Amino acid sequence: MLSQQKSSRLHIGWIMPPFVHELPVNAMDDETAADQLYTLATELLPNHPPAYQYRFALGLSAQLEPMAAANVIYAGLCPLEVDGRPSLSTIVISQITHDSEDEAGALRTTRELLERKYPDDDCQTVELTCGPALTREGTSSFVIDAEWSASGHELPVTQSQMQAYIPLPDTSEMLVFELSSQVGEDWGLHAELFTEILNTVDWGTDQEVEDYRAMRQSAPAVVEPAEEVKQELYWHSSRLMDAVALRGSMGGGEVTSLTCSSCWAKGMRSACSARHDWYIGNVASDDLLPALPRVIESFASQGWRPDEEGTGERVHVWAGDEAPERSAGYAFTASVDTGAGTFTAEVTAPCARASATSDSLFG
């Protein structure tokens, strides 16, 4: 789930796992917000009586007005299951202003303020994918009024809390990400997930986004792909070579990092994918003509799907829901040039930010 926010000069993006349920902090009106909250309550508490679901929705609704006053631009509930028991945390993102001259000054001033206000908490300067940030980890306490409590009684709450302060470059603005949870025994898992989310934060200027939209394809990044990414691309290319079954001279073979079109269009610039380019040359035209139909038939039988806009000389095929789990997010483009006697392939790895691998919390 990719979210985007517009600042005065930047397009800001981050990725939430698909199981995080967004709260309607930006709902058009109260009625829309109420409908969304009740739907959320029934999804999260399907086995509870309607009265309990209603109180839960009321408790959430009581938080919307304070969130709006605090410049919250995103809020979500993150339900996990640990050893068969439910475990819940809340993620809130605010966008605030600061009066420091630069990002380093904003982080320095913020750290001084936090260390005075929370002397027992752990404050650290960290380096995220998007740049330097400041984190605070500690606890906070408050009381839920009986009116808003799901139990109908006043409820004192002590919760673990982690915050990340991320200054936006060349602006007087800062993002504040906050994770809160009452489940102390599972806090490490929620904090680990929160850190993964922080490392998906990225941004681009209006001009950069416009420049990309005018391009036919994204330029490869200079980052060297990880060895495991290369090996998976080689494996999928090998399956494609087996299916195409052509004799000729092999060429190409480079693996390059790139930023996928979806991430780039949302303002993200760091590499998130990789591509393996190769070709088979000196192939007789009579052998090339049936190559693409043979490839489509072979991969379709394994759950892959061709794009409808494919032509007789070019096809784009991607791993559908019925494809093997190992292939989730992979795709390839294959083309033939009968005049040059060449079969060309581009095999692309899934976006690392949004790929649906079995061991990824981001689905």
Image: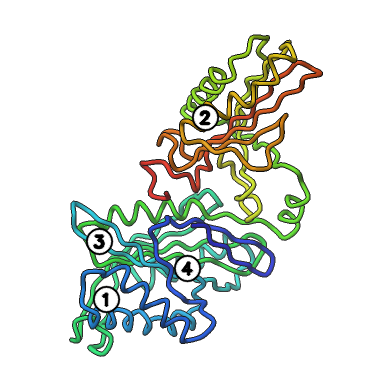
Per the model, the C-alpha gap separating discs 4 and 2 is 42 Å
Give me the residue at 53% from left, 17% from top.
242
Q: Where does residue 257 sit, x and y in percent of width and height? A: 60, 34
Disc assigned to residue 141: 1
In the rendered structure, the answer to whether residue 161 lies left or right of residue 252 reads left
CB-based contact (under 8 Å), mark 4 and mark 2 = no
* Residue identifier under label 3: 87
Tag nearer the camera, 2 or 1: 2
- Identify the secondary structure beneath mark 4: strand
Residue position marked by numbered label 2 in the rendering: 299
Residue 338: quadrant of the picture: top right
Picture disc at residue 93: 4
Q: Tell which circle, 2 or 1, labels the residue nearer the N-terminal end.
A: 1
Q: Nearer the viewer, mark 4 or mark 3?
A: 3
Foreground mark, 3 or 2, reads 2
How far apart are the two marked residues, 1 and 3, measured between alpha carbons? Answer: 19 Å
Q: Earlier in the sequence, mark 4 or mark 2?
A: 4
Which residue is found at the position 39% from the left and 45% from the top?
A: 360
Query: Is the residue 153 above or below the residue 106 in the image?
Result: below
From the top left corner, tell me how far across and down residue 63 is, in percent: 38, 81
Residue found farthest to the right: 339
Label 1 element class = strand
**Dot 1: within a 10 Å radius of its alpha carbon, few (fewer than 14), some, or many (20 or more) residues?**
few
Please, is residue 154 above or below residue 308 in the view? below
On the image, the x and y values in percent for residue 244 come to 59, 19
Viewer-nearest of labels 4 and 2? Answer: 2
As rendered, which of 294 and 128 lies closer to the eye? 294
Q: Which residue is at 34% across, 56% downward?
A: 191
